[in-house]
Amino acid sequence: MSRPIRTMTVAVAALLLATACNSAVGGGSSDKAGGSVRGVTADSVKVGGIVSMTTATGYSKKDTDLGAKARFDRANSEGGVNGRTIDYLGAEDDGQDPAKNLAAARKLVQQDKVFAIAPMSSTTFSGADFLQKEKVPTFGWGTLPSFCGPTYIYGFGGCMVPMPGGTISQTWPEGLKQVTGGARGRSVAILANDSDAGTFAIRTYRQSFASAGYEVTFAKSSVPAGAVPSDWSAYTKEILRSDGGKAPDAVVSVMQTPYNIGLFTALKRTGYDGVLTDPTDYDPALLAKSATKKALDGVHILLSFQPFEQDTPAMAQFKQDIKKAAGKDVPLNMHMMTGYMSADLFLAIAEKAGKNLTVASFQKAANSFSDTGTMVGDRAEPRGRKESFGCGALVQLKDGRYVVSAPFKCYTPIPFK
Amino acid sequence: MSDLLGFVLSGLVSGALYALLATGLVLSYSASGLFNFAHGATAYLCALTFHELHSGLGWPAVPTALLLVCLLAPALGWGLDRLMFRKLARAGETAQIVATIGLLVALPALGLWIVELLADAGVSVAPAENQFGLPGVGPSPAKSWQPVDGVGVDSDQLITWVTTAVVAVGLWVLMRHTSLGLRLRATVDNRSLVELRGMSADRLSSVAWMLSSALAGLAGVLATPLLGLSAHDFTLFLFVSATAAVLGRFASVPLAFAGGLGLGVLQNLVAGYASFADGITGFRTAVPFLILFAGLLVLTRRQRTAGTAAADAPPADYLAGRSWARRWGPWTVAGILLAVSFYTVTTPFWSGLLAQSLALSLVFVSFTVVTGLGAMVSLAQATFVTGAALVAGLLMSHGWPFAAALAAGTCAAAVLGALVALPALRLGGRALALATLALAFLADQVLFQTGLLRNGDTGWAVPRPVVGPVDLGDDRAMGVAMTVLVALAVAGLSALRHSPSGRAMLAVRSAPAAAMASGVSVIRTKLLLFTLSAGIAGFGGVLYASYSTRVTATDFTAMTGLIWLAVVVAAGVRRPQFAVVAGLVYVVVPHLLADHVTESAQLPVVLFGLAGLALANDPDGYAAAVSTRLHRRRTAEAPSAPAGPASPPSPGAVLELRDVRAGYEGAAVLHGVDLAVRPGEILVLLGPNGAGKSTTCGVAAGLLTPFTGRVYVAGVDVTRERSLGRSRAGVLLAPEGRGIFPSLTVEENLALHLPAKEAREAVYTRFPALAARRGVGAGSLSGGEQQLLALAPLLQNPPQVLIADEPSLGLAPRLVAEVFRLLTELKERGTAVLLVEEKATEVLDVADRVAHLSQGRVTWCGPRDQVRADRLTEAYLGAAAPGARRTPRADAEEVPRT
């Protein structure tokens, strides 16, 4: 045994020595490759994306890629940004796997050498620290904490996770006021999944709805998060008795579509005729199925962007761009919008950075960026790293189609306690 | 009250689905000894197919469902059985568990990939993602009724109940009232005996898999409205229904079925009334896994050997005894090359990738401790990784230095490991695997939901350490450091393996009883292994987190742990260096595939699942197979003693063994046995313990293929025929112990051999003792009655050859006499009887001829009247008595020498 150990010790010592020398000499990463800015040439800017497309849960955001492509295509057809066309590589699939998310970020930066990443839309963002360290401007859906704080990471609608010392967006209760005819004397029940995220959602929205003037009679994270319950009576009973034995005026679900279908179906079967609302079911594909159409009929859904049903020049442009990129008429969904607006924010800041595009000039431009009247409302950086832009709308599913029940508007956020 | 009724009724919906899945699990388990982790994936695949055919191609619902359940799903089960399950039935339990885990991910990916391909080919398939509120067999949206105030029922629920009830009745009829059901139940009882009785266990196993698959398909179609198209949810659903299979002890279909129904109700009741647990985030989510864990603890019978998977013999180590350079040279060179490559050839991306795979290798090495050394399948390794990384991150956020946080994280993981091991250790193999899985889910859903530990979705930053002049923030330095750590871990574990404690661990693995007798505490050793393994996993986990520079509670879920195990076992779990290979392959191969082969994310997953197929051939993994296969090729090239042209069989012998050399992996037992039995005679084979008597029986009955030599039945060379072919050729083995199916009744045991009722009645007339107990389970008969039951039906239908391996073992003298009388009767009807016995005195009375077997050779064979006392002594003592040494060969003219 002594010989192998000796051999190994010598080998280890030699290796460590070599490592020490080398990391002293080499090391350090730079965003300059061969004197030029990573991913930027005289006439093009390389951009990549990270999207969870294939997942074991059957939930996919793959149309995010199409949305981004549509926006970049239009930018290129309009001559690019300051004379540079966008070389969009398409999105890497991270499969909702943290390891793959990081690997995708590394691949895009180290192998494909992109200047920026837009869009990044997934349920996990373990590549965030790496992208921040490598100074890669990254644009995506700000529903994860990594979009709040880091200087290179931007949510297209701002940071949508209330952080300590930050704010809560009031779009949901304020929008709902237009449905319930004000908040005075109105009661709401809030239901979420039995998980840490659900508990956090309850904490946030309890404060949000209460400060908008609603009486929160029920707020629990009690629905099992592992699999959709086959029986909702345990939850509906509790909710329907929460307002002093009566049913509350509105039921707010902070859960995913399959749960909402179950909950709302169960509530309607009991004869509940109050307001139902949730933040996830804005997907025109849901209208294609009679079961979902029926289950979600009458439900008010929160959006953090302009509804497709609202007729504005920007929306018309969006629809036209998507159709062109897809090559045919496709049903619209919110993933297209997240991809589109992620790309849009990148383009807007890159435009402002001017002809001399470097990471530094880009960041400088971002630090005083603001515009108004976009499909996600009034954007401003670096404010967006701390809070959401605070704009939203409610749409109602009615007779097999969505109608706007509270038009897109921006509201003042409240401090998060 | 209506609350309660509502909970019960709707609980029966998921209960019915659990029952269908659990029944399928029990069927496939009992047919091939495999716990099919992929059962839920099969259900998902059927749900997906149903969705594509019904919603995509617009086929009508009910015919599509029937086509799926009656045709496609059974075809899938049949195919999988032919391709892998059949072979896996003979592999160790670890290989079995892992192969089906491979399928668990591969089947859904395969389905989705086919959908992708079809979509590319222009077929109007429906998208498989983001599908909610899918139609089932019934009307969509479902019609609903309120029979009692406050209790709602909808059409989907009603369809599930009715279908399940019909299936339950159908299964009962099939299993209890058809001969196919009888044979299936016999296979459940004793697979090898089924083969010895001339029924093809393989074909029965195919039938069981087809049934099992059909049930999964049915559950899939029925669950579509409830679960949608989430492979993940289907698999979770399956794990929960495993509780019901546990309730049926993996053998009883009715118990499993009832258990499934009860489970659904219980789960609903707990969820409905669990308001006491409102303060514990995740409690309600975890209810099914609490039930699974509790069920395993309460219902699993205590195993004789704590926590050990089925004893799988270690593969021969062909490098044993070679020089250090020969054994470790290639690995050392590979390690040094890898380390050097970081500063020479690799690009930054590949440096990172390799560093990542090495960090993961450290985690993977932990499997070689618990599963490789300890033969325990732990599905909770990801929990230890998460636990350690979260603790380390939490401490670093409080300003702890990296080294201290690393140590604390490792300790936390070790403690967690001990906690998981303590209750789990009283369980064996599959139950242990399921228990660790349940605990892993509990940790995910409750422990790691604690805000303090988890820090929301942000998790904790785990910055990379700076050690003296070495800044591990550089991927290359990280890579080299990881290479060194991995090398140390491999060297340390190899040293452990060869240390006294390592030998104690191996002893516990391969022979727990013997280890206990030698003063090794089995429980303590296993606890130590579990703790050590958890510690290593935790250590690797902290380093992996520091590679990613952050850890969140969802980075490594219980499902991740499942896949890790599959990846490691596919490479080989017995040596730590194979785990390193597994780590490299797991991280690197998907990138190579994506860069050079296909853009599809599904194909690599499908390929990975095929590792299960490879395991069916090389149960010790592909890395281990390299040395085994090389060795085999070398030995194949080395000219083995040429068998020479087979000499013709002796005329007159109905069973003949000619110069048979046989034994078990690496150890020959028979060194050239010649035996011939003629019709209508009893040849008694005597010999001391270990002489090779049972091996001879095995060779004669086809349980064992000889290395060299021939076996003839009625002049036909049947050397290559397995037991099924032999028994069909008329050779019947009554194995040592009792050749009966204990769970079947006396009547059913007879019916297997004698389908005609009159023949069975004849047996009852001849043996009134059996007639009196015809409805009784054969297992509860006395030893003598069992032996009679095994032999009695032969009288009605005498075989050409009967090989009776110690039929008198453990019987009272009166019964022995009866058994021997029965054998004599058979002989008189023309059967050639090869009777292996130790009770020489009684047996000589029935023998026509006697053969002495000693040290794997027939030392003497001749007529009974020539048997002398000294030869009997020799037979017992295994050594020639002084006088016997000079036995002239002329005495033994029956022994042909070639």
Image: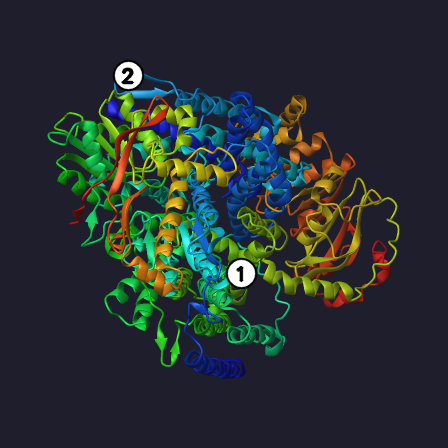
Residue A105 at what x, y percent from top left?
Answer: 43, 58
* In the image, residue B510 above or below residue B268: below
Mark 1 lies on a secondary structure that is helix
Which residue has dot 2 on it? B148
Q: Which circle, 1 or 2, is nearer the viewer?
A: 1
Mark 2 lies on a secondary structure that is strand
The answer to whether residue B112 is seen in the rendering is: yes
Dot 2 falls on which chain?
Answer: B
Q: Nearer the viewer, residue B736 or B379?
A: B379
Residue B71 at what x, y percent from top left?
Answer: 60, 28
Residue B863 at what x, y percent from top left?
Answer: 80, 51
The answer to whether residue B15 is seen in the rendering is: no
Q: Place residue B793 in its image quadrant.
A: top right
In three-dimensional space, the C-alpha distance between marks 1 and 2, rounded to whole angstroms, equals: 60 Å
Which numbered disc covers residue B588?
1
* In the image, residue B249 above or below residue B592: above
Task: Say what amino acid the circle numbered 1 marks.
Answer: Val
Dot 1 falls on which chain?
Answer: B
Label whose residue precedes the other's in the sequence (1 or 2):
2
Q: Nearer the viewer, residue B208 or B829?
A: B208
The reply, left or right, for residue A390 in relation to residue A256 is left
Near mark 2 (Cα within 10 A), the count class, few <14, some 14-19 or many ≥20, is few
Q: Do tags 1 and 2 sit on the same chain?
A: yes
Q: Place residue B729 in its image quadrant.
A: top right
Residue B611 at what x, y percent from top left?
Answer: 58, 52
The reply, left or right, for residue A275 in relation to residue B200 is left
Task: Say what amino acid the circle numbered 2 marks.
Answer: Val
